[in-house]
Amino acid sequence: MKLCIIALLIGLFQPSWSCPEGCTCRAGLVRCVGESLTKIPIEDIPFDTVQLSLDDNFLTSLRPSDFRNLSNLEILSLSDNDISVIDENTFTDLTKLIELRLNENKLTSLPQNIFASTPLETLSLRQNSFVGLPNGIFSSLGKLQNVDLRENPFSCDCVTEWLREWIANNSAIVTRPDLIVCDHPPSLNGKQISLLSKDQFICAAPNFTASPAQTTVRTTLSLTLPCSATGRPPPAFTWRRNNQTLTSDDRITIQDTGSLVISSVLHEDDGLYQCTASNIEDTVTTPTVRITVEELTCFDGLLTSAHETDVDCGGPYCKPCNHSQACKADRDCRDTLLCLGPHQLKSKLLYISKADALYETCANETKAPELIETRLRNAWIAREEPFPNLDASANMETIVTELKDELAAQFKAPLRIFKNVKISSFERQIKAPLLQIEFELDHDSDTDTADDTRANLETIVHEGNLLGTLSLKDGSYKFLVTL
């Protein structure tokens, strides 16, 4: 029985000689400064600690459990962290706390009764993001001797008018009242709060200065929907998609200014969007706009002057085209759309390998080829370096002959290896007519040369020295080039 009681006491009461790893502890003083802490190591902090320094860490929030059993704590320093949220009961048990430093954090607000249980004499809230403080937050602090409110973006409006009067009446305990100034509205920017008149602290309902518009965006790309509004105090912004409230995460960001940023668009982002701005005076909402999401593939703008780039294809790793019905802009998108892998090819090419899976390489050409209705005859004439033997009256036999010479030169192969060279043209919905060149390598009569030519052809593709779409069917020596 005695052993059980001892074990229970050990579990309930922490020994005063413990110390968090990396910290220094001596005679009631614990210093955990610059230790990259993301949470307070309360299990290892001695219960008889009088002074606790947790400056220069990565703390983001404070809860009541963070300071349990520290009833002797008198001085607490939490400066230079990333604290943005503090629970209302965080300091409830710190009934001996006389000094609290929260400067250089990311606090935007505090609960009204957060300091009600503490006998604070010194309080530093300098260099945070306070637009205002709740009326009466200092009313329970009868022993307060020093308050630092400098370097906060205070809004001088009807909500913070009480602060003007409080600073003026308590200037003896306020650190440098002349440096506690208005951040907004612009007309009062930089003005000393305590010297302004009461009638200058007014409120105004939000008024939109920018709102989103209907747009179409491709998957994997980024999207910014503008939304901004004036107001006193500055309004808070929320966004809804299909009547569901959006929250910021790794992919979606609602900026302080109001705009919505989606870093990598997915099909699920398709829908109806609204931006809402609200403050103490009113809540206003923008008209609903439709955002349409389409599949991004290298077929987009394949034969236009707006040529694709590797980035447009989703970067070095393209994502699969989920289903053809999802590819609203690209009727020729296949179920399996993949990238070759990390690449920075100069040519605008696609080629087909195993199982007809499409693989893509995209380019940013300096000058797009002319696209004309009579491309079948004129495509080769319109080149920057036209074939000298071709003119508008050239017949098909002449065109094929010149084409075979060009293929042999480009692929660095003997003319005899090319057979069954054909040219055709077909209309493509929406986009311009395409020119297709079919040819075979004579593998039966010259196996080695055909193999070498095919290998050289793939090298030319990868080096970006061929413009067009090249189809390479696995195990075959038949080729199709689409221009």
Image (spheres, grey):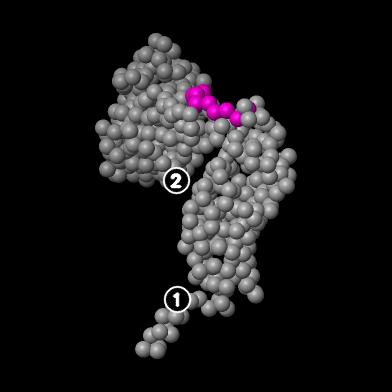
Label 1 to label 2: alpha-carbon separation: 40 Å
Which residues are the magenta region? Answer: 200-209
Toward which corner of the image does residue 190 lie, by quadrant? Answer: top right
Report if the CB atoms under discs 1 and 2 are less than 8 Å apart. no
Query: Quarter holding the N terminus?
Result: bottom left
The residue located at (41%, 80%) in the rendering is 8
Can residue 129 be spotted in the picture?
yes
Q: Amino acid at mark 1?
A: Leu
- Say whether disc 1 or disc 2 marks the residue closer to the N-terminus: 1
Q: Which residue is mark 2?
A: 250
Residue 273 percent location from the top left of the image: 37, 30
Residue 188 percent location from the top left of the image: 66, 29
Residue placed most toward the observer, 180 or 388? 180
Q: Which residue is mark 1?
A: 12
Mark 1 crowdedness (10 Å alpha carbons): few <14, some 14-19, many ≥20: few
Q: Is residue 205 magenta?
A: yes
Query: Quarter holding the C terminus?
Result: top left
The residue located at (54%, 54%) in the rendering is 116
Q: Amino acid at mark 2?
A: Asp
